[in-house]
Amino acid sequence: MVERQLRSRGIRDERLLSAMGTIPRERFVPLETRLFAYQDAPLAIGHGQTISQPYITALMVECLALQGHEIVLDIGSGSGYHAAVLSYLAREVYSVEIIPELTDLSRRNLAAAGCGLNIRLFIGDGSMGCPEAPAQGFDAISVTAGAPSVPEALLTQLRDPGRMVIPVGPHDDQELLVVEKRDGVLHSRTATHCRFVPLRGGAGWRTAR
């Protein structure tokens, strides 16, 4: 996976490649699909949600340019894999999931994988940010669900300077935006085109498609 799907497609962060080569991805997918855990495709994890294909996970995390000291907000815990990858590269990860059953699943998966000591899991509307955000905000924010626009609450919780990665656009076709806040000004660029499950909540899609 690391050599064929990540490094060959331009992922260069060695810490990230090491993390994704270490974390047992099969622990974060249902038992019946573990044989496909490392394939180049998303997989269903229940409740209408998916775990992203490895390359998309790597691209999103690399775009955050984490150095190791950051406090990161992860929106959409899912099965816990994305938070696990972030936890290897950041000081602390706050992960918010709107579906309670998936928060429980994340907690079990992280324990089974032997990681997550620096991850805090929350149940809530991630489109509105984290209810227990640190006073200084987050150094980086990663959103693993497609939003109709960049939620204002997340921009408010993003530190200055700070960086956010978020899929934005209609249900079937989104742009993976890298949004940087510098000196009170927002700068954005498109990393790639993508297709994520809908971001649910007050600043997301009110119902899943």
Image (spheres, helix red, strand yellow):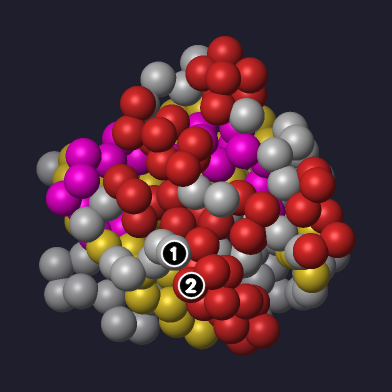
Up the image or down, 87 lies above or below 63; here it is: below
* Left or right of 59 in this view: 118: left
- Give how far across and how far down residue 65 sits, in percent: 30, 35
Label 2 sits on a secondary structure element that is: helix
Q: Residues within 10 Å of mark 1 (few under 14, many from 20)?
A: few
Residue 203 at least partly seen: no
Q: Vertically, is 64 above or below 97?
A: above
| Position of residue 18 measured from the top left corner of the image (x, y, whole percent) | 40, 34
Indicate whether 5 appears above or below 24: above
Q: Name which residue type carries label 2.
A: Ala
Q: Is residue 118 visible?
A: yes
Magenta-drawn segment: 51-76
66 drawn magenta: yes
Whole-number angstrom distance, CA of label 2 to CA of label 1: 5 Å
Q: Residue at x 41, y 62 (%)?
A: 115
Query: Residue at the location (51% across, 62% down)?
Result: 113
Which one is in front, 198 or 187?
198
Q: Quadrant of the N terminus?
A: top right
* Mark 1 residue element: loop
Q: Amino acid at mark 1?
A: Gly
Q: Nearer the viewer, residue 36 or 124?
A: 36
Q: Identify the residue shown where x is 40% and y is 20%.
A: 12
Quarter of the figure with the C terminus? bottom right
Which residue matches tag 2? Answer: 111
How crowded is the residue under tag 2: few (<14 C-alpha within 10 Å), some, or many (20+)? Answer: few
Q: Which residue is mark 1?
A: 114
Confirm or deny contact between disc 2 and disc 1 (CB under 8 A).
yes
Q: Is residue 18 left or right of residue 160?
A: right
